[in-house]
Image: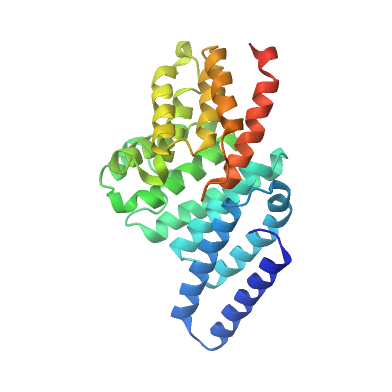
Amino acid sequence: MRGTMKLKKLIQAAWFGVLLLLLNGCTTIVNSISQGFAEDLSAAILNNNDLDMVRDGAPSYLILIDSLLASSPDDAFMLRQSAKLHSAYAAAFVTEEVRAKLLHDKARRLALASVCSGMRNACEIDQLSFQDFNAWLAVRKKRDVPQMYDLGTTWAGWIQANSDDFSAIADLGKVKALMTRTAELDPNYDSGGVFLYLGVFETLLPPAMGGKPELGRRHFERAIELSEGDNLLAKVMFAEQYGRLVFDRKLHDRLLTEVLESPGDVPGLTLMNTVAKQQAQQLLDSADDYF
């Protein structure tokens, strides 16, 4: 999603093509084209480093993805793509609290619907008791990791957006268990992205309140190692969540300086790396006041 007139015309052409195929009754072909289009659109958004362009153009394409879903409401892949895009857009660009909550609510519903459609015995898993939820996790296989990971990241975003709601915070244990199991099944998935989330979970609180910052540090270091340093958000979160928690100014500034000096254009990470660079500069600018 690059927001240019050229890509807009390509999107329009692709969508008109889908409409024509629908009229001809070619359902199987339509589903294939729709999935490919949604995947390409997600990649285009995540690989764009023009934040203003993405911010201004993304809502139109979120609606477009929803229109594709309207013809295949139980398509697990399409539901996942829509959930990821809504969650990423809300996290990166939406500052209005009410709107952010609405977008994260929608992303979570889509992610839950995706696992319900795409995995066995996975409907309404958010309603399970913690014991039953862990029992469900215990029988997951490596093939389930992509959907588990996307559900976990989307669910975590929803919790953050609803941090003033104790019922939402209560879900943190389930999300942590979900991501821990994901790491056990495939630690290398998404270049170790799961460890970024595990690092955040362990550094939400100081040790006196149950936090485990040193375990969190190991998770952050693992995320950086597995991404070969390409995931700049891992370094930003390492600095903010761990460096500030334990008042390690030297580590904090080193990590953020590395982010600012690193190339951000990495396939699949460009958008978030660009956001990470902005956040790194903001954290450095406020470091004297914090430390």
For the residue pair 1 and 81, the one nearer the viewer reads as 1
- 200 and 234: which is toward the camera: 234
103, 258: nearer the viewer: 258
Residue 274 horizontal/vertical position (percent): 62, 41
Q: Is residue 225 visible?
A: yes
Compared to 290, does 180 lie above or below? Answer: below
Point out residue 38 in the picture as x, y percentages from the top left corner: 54, 64
Q: Please state which of residues 145 and 109 is positioned toward the viewer in this rendering.
A: 145
At x 69%, y 43%, the residue is: 94
- Residue depicted at 46% across the width and 73% down the height: 32
Left or right? Give the position of 214 relative to 273.
left
Residue 289 lies in quadrant: top right
Query: Number of callouts in the render?
Result: 0
Q: Residue at x 60, y 64 (%)?
A: 66
Quarter location, residue 185:
top left
User: Considering the image in quadrants, where does the N terminus appear?
Assistant: bottom right
| Coloration of the structure image | rainbow
Q: Residue 161 in the image: x percent, y percent?
A: 61, 37
Residue 14, image x, y percentages: 60, 75
Instruction: Indicate whether 36 appears above or below 246.
Output: below
Which picture quadrant has residue 91? top right
Taking 102 as reference, is 107 left or right?
Answer: left
291 in relation to 133, above or below: above
Please say whether residue 129 is visible from this viewpoint. Answer: no
Residue furthest out toward the bottom: 24
Is 112 situated left or right of 281 in this image?
Answer: left
Q: Residue at x 64, y 70 (%)?
A: 11
* Quarter of the rendering occupied by the C terminus: top right
